[in-house]
Amino acid sequence: MSFILIGLIAFLLGVSVTAWFLFGNRMRMGIPAHASIDDDFTTLDKFWATLCIGDARVELIDDASARGGKFARTVVNQAADDQLALAQIDDYIYRPMADFAWTPPLTLETRMRFSSNQGPGTVGLFLWNNPMGLGAELADVRPMKWIGMYRASPTSDFSALGEKTGLRATVLNGSWFNLFALFMPLFPKPPVYEKPLDGLKDWTEWHTFHIEWRAHQIVITIDGDTMIDAHERIKGPLGLVIWYDNNQPHTGNNKLDLCYDPVTEPAYLDIDYLTIQRGE
């Protein structure tokens, strides 16, 4: 058990130091603290940073049915099972966590569709704290917290986090104790609220996704139907990420493995518009 703990600490330190050298001395980007966002993605403007790895792109596509005449697409075109491909839009990657933009109360609304009802890798939209992620610094290592919607391929395994694969609306409110659940099953798993979405709708069609994030409650609706009503306190600040990648994470068996799903045809997530209104 002690060797596992030492290994975990060493892993976290290694990730944080590496991220600091890669990103810590770059210019801070992303959105400033502001009251709201109302973006129809006619351009990728000052709100957003983009990150593309491998054969993946963030594209703006003309479409007369979109609110502004265009929509944004995060697409992985193809990838082998030994290489990462990632297309991401976010507002935080060059910011320390203390400067993330979003705290409650707020409402988020967007219109999304997927390339298929099932597909490779992971894809979704999160308000989250980017723990141990790209651009994170040593002071940013935190237990995971997120609010949003994601899909993981059936070959993934999130069991140590209490999450499952497939398409889900989800809220996760981790603590330091829960962080060790990845490697030590005696530690409690984080509070997880989720609603399986597979089969409820045709996700290749446009659907309206809405988050109401209050001080002690988070409500997620899709097309006006309530999917999650979680009485949890997530203080923030959180950042926003929209992504598609071919990651195939495994958190079972008291270890964290990162594998990759092969992608043989374009797999994507489309975003028509996105609004965030900060409450009083």
Image: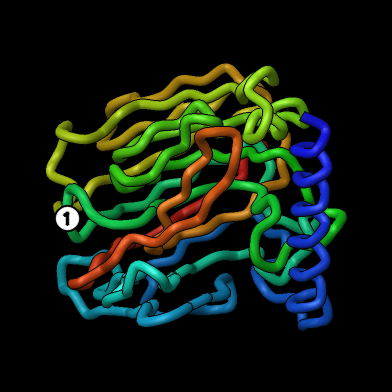
Residue that badge 1 annotates: 116
Which residue is painted at 30% across and 61% down in the image?
269
Horizontal side of residue 79 vs 247, given as left or right: left
> Which image quarter: residue 156?
top left
Q: Compared to 68, does 195 lie above or below?
A: above
Quadrant position of residue 134: bottom right
> In the picture, residue 208 is in which quadrant?
top left
Q: Is residue 74 visible?
A: yes
Q: As shown in the figure, which amino acid type bears the numbered disc 1?
A: Ser
- Quick check: 258 left or right of 111? right
Q: Residue at x 33, y 60 (%)?
A: 261
- In the rendered structure, the answer to whether residue 228 lies left or right of residue 133 reads left
Question: Dot 1 lies on which element?
Answer: loop
User: Considering depth in this image, is 40 or 184 the residue closer to the camera?
Assistant: 184
Residue 232 screen position, x and y as percent = 62, 21
Count neighbours of disc 1 (C-alpha within 10 A) and say few if under 14, some if 14 to 19, many if 20 or more: some
**Height in image: 246 above or below 1?**
below
Which quadrant does the C terminus fall into? top right
In this rendering, the answer to whether 230 lies above or below 130 is above
Residue 244 seen in render: no
| Figure coloring | rainbow
Between residues 107 and 170, which one lies in front from this camera angle?
170
Instruction: Report the residue at 40% width, 40% height from top.
Output: 210
**Residue nearer the viewer, 145 or 122:** 122
Residue drawn at point x = 78 percent, y = 50 percent = 141
